[in-house]
Image (tube, coloured by chain):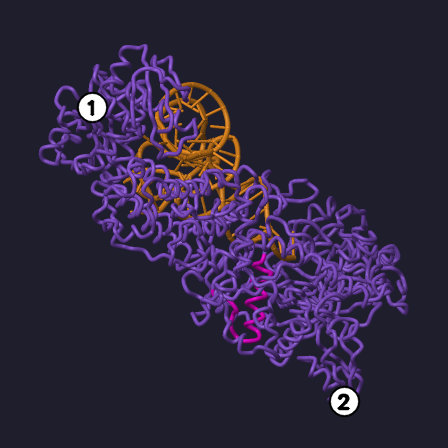
Amino acid sequence: MTQERLPSRPFPSLPAQIDLPAVEHEVLRRWSERKVFERSLEQTRGGPNWVFFEGPPTANGQPGVHHVEARVFKDVFPRFKTMKGFHVERKAGWDCHGLPVEVAVEKELGLSGKKDIEEFGVAEFNARCRASVLRNVDAFTQMTERMGYWVNMDEAYRTMDPEYVESVWWSLKVIWDKGLLVRDYRISPYCPRCGTSLSDHEVAQGYETVTDPSVYVRFPLTSGPLADPDHPTALLVWTTTPWTLVSNTAVAVHPDVNYVVATDGTERLLLAEPLVGSVLGEGWKLTGERFEGAEMERWTYQRPFELVAFDQPAHYVVLADYVTVEDGTGLVHQAPAFGADDMAVSRAYGLPIVNPVRGDGTFEADLDLVGGVFFKEADTALTADLKERGLLFRHVAYEHSYPHCWRCHTALLYYALPSWYIKTTAIKDELLAQNAETNWVPANVKEGRYGEWLRNNVDWALSRSRYWGTPLPVWICPEDHVNVVGSLAELGELAGRDLSALDPHRPYVDDVTFACPQCGGEAHRVPEVIDVWYDSGSMPFAQWGAPHRNEDVFRDNFPGQYICEAIDQTRGWFYSMMTVSTLVFGQSSYENVVCLGHILAEDGRKMSKHLGNILEPMAVMERHGADALRWFMAASGSPWTPRRVGHAALEEIVRKVLLTYYNTASFFTLYANAGQAWDHSRLADAPAPADRPLLDRWVLSELNRVVKGVDEALERFDTATAGRLLTAFVDDLSNWYVRRSRRRFWAGANTPEGASAFATLFECLETVTLLMAPLVPFLTEHVWAALRRPDAAESVHLASWPQVREELIDEELSRQMALTRRLVELGRAARADSGVRTRQPLARALVGATLFGSLPEQLRGQIREELNVVALDSLSVVGGDLVDYTVKPNFRALGKRFAKRTPLIAQGIGAADPKTLVEQIRSTGWAHIEVEGEPVEVSAEEVLVTEQPREGWAVASEAGETVALDLEVTPELQLAGLAREVVRLVQDARKASGLDISDRIHLWWSATDPTTARAVAEHAATIGGEVLAASMTEGAPEEEVYSVSSQDYGVTLWLRKA
RNA sequence: GGGCGUAUAGCUCAGUCGGUUAGAGCGCAUCCCUGAUAAGGAUGAGGCCCCAGGUUCAAGUCCUGGUACGCCCA
């Protein structure tokens, strides 16, 4: 569409019909041609920085509509702050590494597992991962542009770029130097066939129901009060993985559970009291000996197998809260190499971690009984051996769900793998202190979900045995000296050659070795790469390549003021952003963090290809427009809770918000361009706001309340409230201000009323366009281009945020207008009830409402016009016997004064004679009532009075307010009504015949109905004025012209342009 | 199993400091208004404010416990 200005017309026209997606494409073109984003940055350079950090989306897979959500929030506040004069750099970023990328590429290549990848070649595999990431980045870029998210994608950081990797290395070296980077074991779900550990997500895909042996084994006690060799007592231990008994290290009990000794006459077993019945059954009785778990700590026992060596003390009872009495015996066998809980407990006791199972899942070859046997297959031999030695108490089959490899269906092993950790537990207090300084939106996340997570902090398992990730920059020599390298330059120095062009990924970086500075032995890099969350948490410095490069830029942009993602990032990015910076710099990297709820499909379920309920973001934006989708994300419901998005919701936003706003602007240009045109120069001549009609003062007051409210809401990151305020104002502006002011616009800009109206509407549109610009940047830009003052910024996004004009806010007027509108609604209800159409004027309306007396004449005039009545009076002028009163207690007021006695007083008010009560209140402001024989005085504000005329009126009441219409239609009123019908017929005909609103016409009329004829004749001047008739002639014209007839009123009308 | 959140009309959601007639939009039906509008207005039908206790003169609202769903973790 074009926005050309005709010489005679001050404004380009905004046609009533609009194709929103087409407008958006036009706006996108304009932004790009005129470099508006770049100029918005240029313009604010030198202003205070407001630092925004882009949480890099994982460029794995195609963007979905849920990606639009966070990206809307990442756009709205930087636009808002830019309009307020802040300089908001927006550097895009892409999270490139990680298992999901690897898995996608594996699928693409038909590979399965690490063995396949290594045969395929790590260099080529990683090259494919890189290519896959770049493909998806493209799709994200297109979506980002289309939705109007202003972010600098030309200089986007990528976590796979060498400069980024080098920054990450540097930070890890800082952490190492602080002694917080350590080696330890980590229990991971592990597929022995594929030789790889699996992510939680992969594990979740592979649960299968299997039957395992369930064994109860005797562990005879060797110390403690029950270790009597004459009456030996054994711990009764239950496990479904007999093969782990080889590595038994301890037995865990719950400190608060009671354990008891039971005997069948020959042997004595110790187990949890609640499980005696279900485990032992008939023939067993309790000996009366009873211990709390806590008392049993460190009692030693005889371990079940002597197959592997322990070089430290072990095999005693330990305490653990995770032990339950729901199944088993309440005594839990501990093999720390094969269970995360076991590992944690054993570590707390300083127990050794013994692991006789090799990476391929078989026991070490030199072991007796099970040497070389696959772990799962060792159960039979081990169980048989236990039975032979009299240690097996019971052996049954046990069916349960157990995780298997999703690739090859091999049973997974929970397996201790050597792993690198960051000792985040050492900085837990610092993290809590940083969190205390952080503003969370919504607030509950701070101490809730996130605070809880911090308080239960465990060390960060950093390493991954994978390929496509930032390589852990650790080189180890045969003497086990650890060398952490902080840059390629440093690595080059160690290796004695220039490595500045090295790709710091596997396998190239693995090939670099050097002589250990401590012992001269050849140091090799450890095989691991790091957790991708560490990559993304490093972005505040790594996006600049700091400190190797751009150290100053980094320092100017740290910490950040604002980050935003969906709620699932609490333990992901929000955590890694806070933790990496606290580890490296001793402070969090962000001050404000917004957590969004998830976007669901219209059916309330997650969007998934499988369910076929995906909304494709580009298609959605082409259908409804990006603005509609943005408004939905920002302002529909509560962004912090899950929300359902669908076409219906977006259509409603288009109709209720966007088109209502646009059509108001369209109306404005239509009339500003008509007749004696209005242009910006008239703003100077317009009356001061205080001298404008009350309706204008009201809408300016509302406008400024909205400016204030929207500003405050956006300052606290509350787009939902901002959206609600704007929706309500746009509705008020269109459906009350414009509706009530139409006549003044018709009257034209040269009349005093018109001058006010044009100025007021222009000011409202200009300001509301600014307020809406961060939320719906396209449509506001389009409207801005049409309406802007000649000296105003070329783009709304280069303009300044509006300042509230407190002096224009008039709370009293707001209340009065609210009453005016309530009374109009009541009057319309009364008309609808009685079936008298609004075009039929009525003689009088009566109003009963507390504040009616204070209503200014101008507002009474609004009611008269809107209800089409000649006179408007208070019901009290009728008074006396013609009016019925009902009174109700106002509990809110009564409660303050009477507290417990409120119900009694309320009852007393109900029992009193309404008329007497009202008369007392009217004359003295107080009324006397009886409560339990005692006199009590109640004030005017403590009772709600409703008054209704007795008969002959159409009445509507609500909440103590009443409007009554006099239904008597006198002959004069009837004629006036008919005249209005004729006016409407002519107006319809003008519109239907395509006349311009300011065209003058010649009008002919002929009435078969004598009453109508009289009405036209008597009201000819009015009719002619209303319809811009230059001449009005009775009888048909001689020429052929446009005509319309009404059988209802017995009239035919002809018209043509004058 | 734990933490956090959500639950109000058929649907999507508001609901302020606790105040006795709980609202809006969509959808349905009937009617009205219209010289910007894809709009606007009125009326009608539609409510166990998730359940159970408690606090209070008074609870959709505050407290405790539960149920269902969601997210994260185990």
Q: Is residue A537 above or below residue A61?
A: below
Q: Nearer the viewer, mark 2 or mark 1?
A: 1
Which label is found at residue A519? 2
Which one is in front, A983 or A53? A983
| Callout 2: chain | A
The chain shown in purple is which?
A: A
Instruction: From the image, tell me which residue sits under label 1.
Output: A844
Q: Residue at x 29, y 35 (%)?
A: A743
Towards the viewer: A59 or A260: A59
Q: Distance from label 2 to label 1 (Cα)?
A: 106 Å
Q: Quadrant of residue A582?
A: bottom right
x 37%, y 20%: residue: A1054
Mark 2 element type = loop
Lateral position of residue A380 relative to residue A1053, left or right: right
Q: Is residue A1033 above or below residue A738?
A: above
Label 1 near label 2: C-beta < 8 Å? no
Chain identity for the colour orange used in the image? B
